[in-house]
Image (cartoon, rainbow, N blue to C red):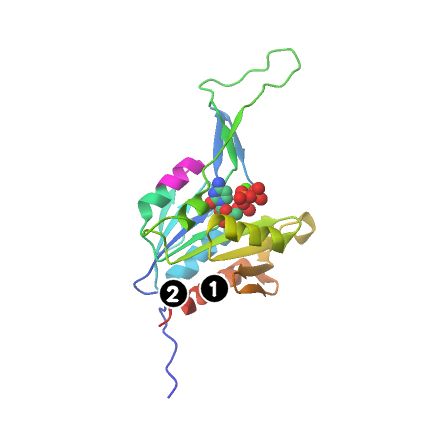
Amino acid sequence: ALLAPAAKPLAGRHILITSGPTHEPIDPVRYIANRSSGKQGHAIAAAAAAAGARVTLVSGPVTLADPAGVTTIHVETASAMLAAVERALPADAAIMAAAVADWRVAREGTEKIKKDGSGLPPALALVENPDILATVGQLGPARPKLVVGFAAETENLIANAQAKLARKGADWIVANDVSPETGVMGGNANTVRIVSKDGVEDWPLMDKAEVARRLIERIAAHFAP
Ligand code: CTP
Ligand code: CA
């Protein structure tokens, strides 16, 4: 006889998710950030909780409510996000959906930077932020069994996603085309492809909640005995 599919296929699993942008302060009133609503990462957290997982969501600044049934940790910067992720380990799966700012200023000003009247802009020295996905993907024994990253690209989607898969030690990359004409940024829909060592799987245009459910289904299938 066919068995009914488990209603809570991720029961007993811990899923760690990052979402939203990070904000890197320049001075007390200014910051560097990526565009990210957090909609996709938060939807994945909600879907994972609905599938019975214990979920830790490390979120940058977003206007979304904390998903019900999810432990949400609020952070501002990439460094704080990495620290929160490391504290939340171990996890069975890590899904790094945050749009982490690639750079922060080398020296955060303690006072507001003032225009000096010369008409010349201040020189901001930047340093690269830690790569949270690459850190988690390349952990030793503490590495989650399944590590999933995202690649938002405006061109060369598959090649860039494959390069990220290898460079960051991820198992899957959820690749999405964010060129302005797609309306993905800030919108409710997403067209994604799942890139892994086994190839590329194209998913049709779906809303972000549906992308989240399908991704969680795929993760549950991965963990199924
Ligand atoms: N990521 C991360 N930490 C960073 C940068 C990126 O965890 N400092 C993660 C993102 O959460 C995402 C994946 O890496 O899952 C790809 O992010 P992306 O910005 O596309 O990759 P980068 O390596 O920063 O490359 P790019 O130069 O294209 O921005
Ligand atoms: Ca980046």
* Residue 114: percent from left, percent from top: 55, 15
Taking the spot 51% from the left edge, 52% from the top edge, the residue there is 166
Q: Which residues are magenta?
A: 75-83
Based on the picture, tell me whether residue 204 belongs to the magenta stretch. Answer: no
Furthest-bottom residue in this view: 1
Q: How many marks?
A: 2
* Residue 217: percent from left, percent from top: 45, 67
Horizontal side of residue 134 vs 152, given as left or right = left
Q: Earlier in the sequence, mark 1 or mark 2?
A: 2
Is residue 127 shown to the viewer in this render? yes
Based on the picture, tell me whether residue 76 belongs to the magenta stretch. Answer: yes
Badge 1 vs badge 2, beta-carbon distance below 8 Å: no
Magenta segment, prevailing SS (helix, strand or loop): helix
* Residue 18: percent from left, percent from top: 43, 48
Q: Quadrant of the C terminus?
A: bottom left
Please tell me whether mark 2 sits on a helix, a strand or a loop: loop
What's the mark number on residue 157? Answer: none
Q: CA distance from mark 1 to mark 2?
A: 9 Å
The amino acid marked with disc number 2 is Ala
* Residue 83: percent from left, percent from top: 36, 39
The residue to which callout 2 is attached is: 51
| Viewer-proximal residue among 54 and 126 | 126
Taking the spot 46% from the left edge, 51% from the top edge, the residue there is 169
Q: Quadrant of the N terminus?
A: bottom left
The residue to which callout 1 is attached is: 213
The amino acid marked with disc number 1 is Arg
Bin the neighbour count of mark 1 within 10 Å (Cα to Cα): few under 14, some 14-19, many 20 and up: some
Q: Determine whether 176 is above or below 12 in the image.
A: above
Please tell me whether mark 1 sits on a helix, a strand or a loop: helix
Furthest-top residue in this view: 117
| Viewer-proximal residue among 17 and 93 | 93
